[in-house]
């Protein structure tokens, strides 16, 4: 539950930052898209890191912490833009639908994510996350740093939050998506 609410707060901030960065550009290039994506992933990871710190360090309920963070992100978004949220720029869709020969960019990104997951699931961090999910007490008795692992899990979740923007509507138009 906590990670899901953390994603909502990160999305609010990420869409706002993305919209603000693109709103002032005379021309949107691939370089700016990559830079913006990296910036919003970093912001999402920082938001997740903050959530994870408060949940792990102070043993607060994840839902309460992430709900509070979501409210803070909404307030920060309203300071940056006068209306909340935003739309995904159509240039994102154009770039994701680009093809290299017969292979679409989205398929390349999916393959890269699957490769990252295959590598990640063999790491001790992934095993630690699974162990904590099964039993925090048992994980702690086995020498796993529960606090460190929880903070990292929240940071990873926040970093992947921008990928959830308009999930399920990859070809939506700016006039139809919010």
Image (cartoon, helix red, strand yellow):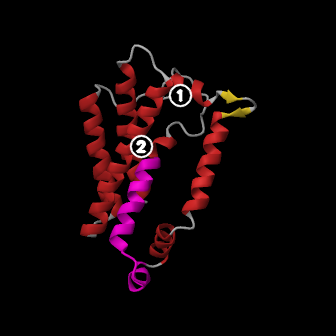
Residue at image position (64%, 34%) is 105
Earlier in the chain: of badge 1 and badge 2, it is 2
Image point 46% across, 20% down: which residue? 28
Q: Disc 2 designates what residue? A: 41
The reply to whether residue 87 is visible in this rendering is no
Name the quadrant of the N terminus. Answer: bottom left
On screen, 130 above or below 7?
Answer: below
Give whichever of 136, 125 is nearer the camera. 125
Q: Is residue 98 left or right of residue 128?
A: right
Q: Quadrant of residue 42?
A: top left
Provide the major secondary structure of the magenta segment: helix
Which residue is situated farthest in the top direction here? 26
Which residue in the protein does label 1 denote? 92
| Disc 2 crowd, CA 10 A, few/some/many (<14, 14-19, 20+) | many
Is 121 placed above or below 164 here?
below
Residues in magenta, as a range: 136-160
Instruction: Tell me where residue 157 appears, x and y as whole percent.
Output: 44, 54
Asked if the stretch drawn in magenta spans residue 159, the answer is yes
Residue 78 position by quadrant: top left
> Which corner quadrant of the image does residue 20 belong to?
top left
Residue at position x 39%, y 39% in the image: 40
Q: Secondary structure at mark 2?
A: helix
Label annotation for residue 12: none
What is the x, y in percent for residue 123? 52, 67
Could you tell me if residue 152 is visible in this image?
A: yes
Q: Left or right: 76 with respect to 25?
A: left
Q: Tell me if residue 137 is in the magenta stretch.
A: yes
């Amino acid at each position: 539950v906590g990670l899901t609410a953390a994603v909502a707060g990160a999305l609010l901030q990420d869409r706002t930052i993305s919209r603000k960065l693109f709103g002032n550009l005379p021309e949107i290039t691939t370089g700016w898209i990559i830079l913006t994506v990296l910036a919003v992933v970093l912001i999402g990871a920082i938001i997740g890191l903050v959530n994870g710190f408060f949940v792990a360090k102070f043993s607060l309920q994840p839902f309460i912490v992430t709900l509070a963070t979501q409210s803070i992100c909404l307030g920060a978004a309203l300071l940056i833009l006068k209306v909340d949220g935003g739309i995904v720029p159509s240039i994102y869709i154009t770039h994701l639908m680009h093809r290299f020969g017969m292979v679409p960019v989205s398929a390349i990104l999916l393959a890269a994510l699957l490769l990252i997951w295959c590598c990640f699931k063999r790491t001790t961090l992934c095993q630690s996350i699974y162990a904590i999910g099964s039993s925090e007490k048992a994980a702690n008795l086995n020498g796993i740093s529960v606090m460190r692992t929880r903070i990292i899990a929240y940071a990873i979740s926040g970093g992947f939050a921008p990928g959830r923007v308009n999930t399920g509507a990859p070809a939506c138009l700016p006039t139809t998506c919010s």
